[in-house]
Amino acid sequence: LPEGHTIRRLANLQNKFLAGRVVTASSPQGRFTGGAAAIDGHVLRTTEAVGKHLFQHYRGGPTVHIHLGLFGKLTSGTGEPPEPTGAVRLRLVAGHAWMDLRGATTCELIDPPEIAVLLARLGPDPLRGDADPLRAWKRISRSKTAIGALLMDQKVVAGVGNVYRAELLFRHRVDPFLPGARLREETWMSMWADLVTLMRAGVRTGRIETVLAEDRPRARGALKRDEAGYVYRRQGLPCRVCGTEIRTEVMVARNLFWCPHCQAPGNAG
DNA sequence: GCTAAATGTTGAT
DNA sequence: TCAACCTTTAGCT
């Protein structure tokens, strides 16, 4: 289940194994038959990631827009593609590589004006070199909405999801309920820089690891699954820094996790 | 084997 | 604010 780093990884994978090749496209499940027909036999020029969105640009025009949503999955491999099982919305085969898409919220053909509309409503993406953190700051600094809610808003920052939200707020000791307008600009700029580092690492490793070495229970060795974060899904467990029980509460329809001591009410970083 | 929950977004109410 | 989208997986039995 993907945040921005996963989407970027998937784009990289497609660029490595599928791009530059003629693609055979099909929709075994049948819900993207027309779209598959439109790209079948075309060369995949490049796959682009913006926030949590994927765009497959085909030579000669068509672009496929994919958004995995909460349940979507993209699987891929090399060699003979497996017999399609379950609801494969889109299968691509190119050279000796293949890709299957299931359960996505969005899988559609999209034209340039529609792409422009979509991109216009996305905030800066920390994984893109051209992203401007001040664009996000403009929204945050004039909003009464809680910073924990603003971070989930793709118009503010594109690509951040529930895990990065919780971990980023903890790493900067920011109260998730603090109104955006009460965050300091300096805090935001350091949060942004941190997000760039964390998400780039996420693209490299394929997982979200946020715990600083000095806060890890063990000095060496691979991190266990439950050691990768400070607060995400650690409700009821002691804070790695102060020992206070981690709390959870729904914010913007997703479970927020935070340390009520390190991220005390009013704490602006 | 079954159930609930899960890193998301949209559109209707 | 809520249902819908539609799949995988963790945690039970």
Image (spheres, coloured by chain):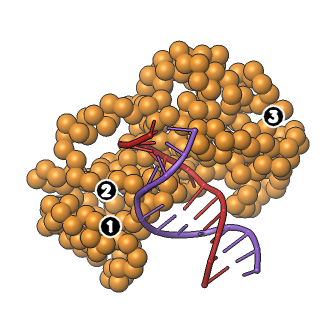
Chain colours: A orange, B red, C purple
The answer to whether residue A79 is left or right of residue A23 is: right
Q: Chain of mark 3?
A: A
Q: Which mark is residue A220?
A: none
Residue A206 appears at what percent x and percent y? 54, 57
Q: Which mark is residue A107?
A: 2
Residue under circle 1?
A: A89
Q: Residue at x 31, y 37 (%)?
A: A118
* Spatial separation of the CA atoms under disc 2 and disc 3: 40 Å
Q: Residue at x 42, y 50 (%)?
A: A8
Relative vertical location of residue A142 with respect to residue A124 in this rendering, above or below: above
Q: Mark 1: which amino acid?
A: Arg
Q: Nearer the viewer, residue A51 or A103?
A: A103
> Nearer the N terminus, badge 2 or badge 1?
1
Q: Mark 2: which amino acid?
A: Cys
> Nearer the N terminus, badge 1 or badge 3?
1
Q: Chain of mark 2?
A: A
Do callouts 2 and 1 point to residues on the same chain? yes
* 2 and 1 marks in contact (CB < 8 Å): yes
Q: Nearer the viewer, residue A202 or A107?
A: A107
The answer to whether residue A89 is left or right of residue A38 is: right
Relative vertical location of residue A4 with respect to residue A138 in this rendering, above or below: below
Residue A193 appears at what percent x and percent y? 56, 31
Q: Chain of mark 1?
A: A
* 1 and 3 marks in contact (CB < 8 Å): no
Q: Quadrant of residue A82?
A: bottom left
Residue under circle 3?
A: A260
